[in-house]
Image (cartoon, rainbow, N blue to C red):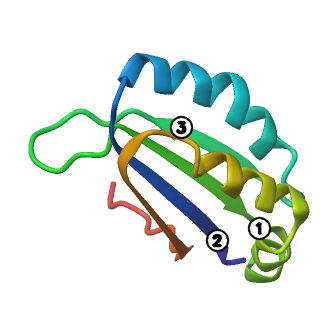
Amino acid sequence: MACVHRLTVQYFDPTDGTGFEAVYRERHVPIVQEVPGLARFVLSTPRGTGDTPHLVAELWFEDAETMKAALGSSQMSRAAEDAETYEVARRVMFAAEVEDVATSA
C-alpha cells in the first residue's frame, strides 16, 4: 500500500470569520488548486470547545516525493504568500504521512 502524505493548515480566530471564509474560498482556493501533484484538497470548519481552529485545509499528495516537489513549487510559494495576508490570531501548518487503519466490523 502506498503511503499518502498530507499538508494540514489550521487557521485560528480570524478577525472577521465570515469575511475570512469568503476571501479564502474566492482567492486562496483557486491558488491551491494549481499546486502540482495535489491529489485532494479538503476544507473543514470544526466547531468545538477550547482551542479549536476556525478553518482547516488539508492538501493530500500520493507520496513524499510528490509533496516535496509541491512544497518547492512556485504555486505553493504563491499560496504561502497569500496565506500570510489573512488576519488570524495564528496559523499552524504541519505535514504528515497518513496511515489508513481499518476499523473492525
Left or right position of 54 against 97 = left
Residue topped by disc 1: 62
Which residue is at 42% across, 52% downward?
10
Q: Which mark is residue 29?
A: none
**Count of labels in the image:** 3
User: Label 3 amino acid?
Assistant: Leu
> Is residue 60 shown above or below 22?
below
Left or right position of 71 against 91 = right
Residue 87: percent from left, percent from top: 44, 39
User: Label 2 amino acid?
Assistant: His
Which residue is at 43% across, 64% downward?
102
Label 1 or label 2, whichever comes before in sequence order: 2
> Is residue 65 shown above or below 104?
below
Quarter of the image that includes the C terminus: bottom left
Quarter of the image that includes the N terminus: bottom right
Residue 46: percent from left, percent from top: 31, 37
Q: Nearer the viewer, residue 7 or 78?
A: 78
> Is residue 60 shown above or below 63?
above
Residue topped by disc 2: 5
